[in-house]
Image: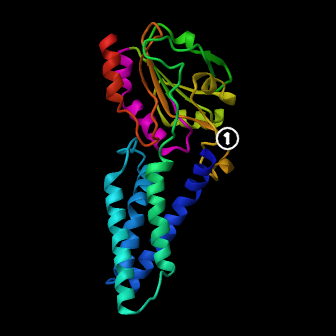
Amino acid sequence: MNKLKAIFIGFYPMLAMAGLFVAVQGLFADTTEILWWGLFLINIPILFLIAKAYIGGKTARTTPNLYGSIFVATLGFVLAQTSLILSMLAGSVESFDFYQAITIVTYVSVLLYVFWYSTFGRVPSKTIVMGEAFPPVTFEDSEGNKINTASLIGSPTVYLFFRGNWCPLCMAQISELADEYKRLQATGTNVVLVSPQSHKKTASLAAKHNVDFKFLTDPNFEAAKELGIFMKNGLPLGLEVLGYDSDTLYPTIVVTNKQGAIIFHDQTDNYRVRPEPDVFLKIIESVS
């Protein structure tokens, strides 16, 4: 299933852009044709969301079902189908044409993106349990040194497991934590950022943030597998050319107290739904 999702998300943005291009081209020719307005409305919401995430860099989360985007896309689909019905009644077309097919395919793709692709269907990890000790797993720093979670006991710790530099919501989530650096520092909290990407890519990310966080890697997914957050074939199709592994991990947050016990965790089942930092920062402050 993950492989199908990787293929889908690899092609969907291109399909949506093609639909938007056709719509804009049609509007230049005839702004009164509701087919073009319908096709425009179907594709613009999700493309805007994706562009905002990649270009804006501040979008760390969305609503689960994107009801606003679904409403706009559905309105566009209704307009497009109304255009077909009116054309058939006028005798200008006798059946579905190429442009009507595009409206159907792109609208179904919107629904697939929101309700199918965005959700993982993950099974919560059996090793990440509230009140239990965080498992003693090992990561690597940029120089290849081993860092075991046991060495972090004695201070509250936020573990943020992210998919890689390619994931815009992950990058925004890290920026949010960096913005809360002084608040985290006041409680003596360690922040550990872990991904399966290369040391080079992790070092590049660390260079962008002037904060005393631990930017670590999980080679061969050893820790991810032990923690039950490994994701097979989770990388969008095409990103392998940028040096990323086709496998990844589920975005996960774990917070431990000074004794190393888990006091908060978030194992989201939707890559667009992630907790606000204030949610777990309040918990840390209450036990510090």
Compared to 167, does 196 lie above or below? above
> Which residue is found at the position 65% from the left and 39% from the top?
247
In the drawing, does residue 283 fall left or right of residue 136? Answer: left
Circle 1 sits on which residue?
245
Compared to 117, does 69 lie above or below? below
Q: Residue furthest bottom?
A: 91
Q: Tell me the quarter of the image containing the C terminus.
A: top left
Give percent across and percent down for residue 122.
52, 35
Magenta stretch?
A: 161-187
Total marks placed:
1
> Which residue is found at the position 47% from the left and 66% from the top?
106
Question: Is label 1 in a helix, a strand or a loop?
Answer: loop
Give percent across and percent down for residue 18.
51, 70
Q: Toward the viewer: 200 or 168?
A: 168
Compared to 17, does 141 lie above or below? above
Q: Using the rendered image of the protein, determine whether residue 140 is visible from the camera's viewpoint.
A: no
Q: Using the rendered image of the protein, determine whether residue 73 is visible from the camera's viewpoint.
A: yes
In the drawing, does residue 234 fall left or right of residue 90? Answer: right
Q: Toward the viewer: 61 or 141?
A: 61
Compared to 129, does 65 lie above or below? below
58 falls in the magenta region = no
The majority secondary structure of the magenta stretch comes to: helix
Give percent across and percent down for residue 90.
35, 92
For residue 60, what is the image quadrant? top left
Give percent across and percent down for residue 32.
31, 84
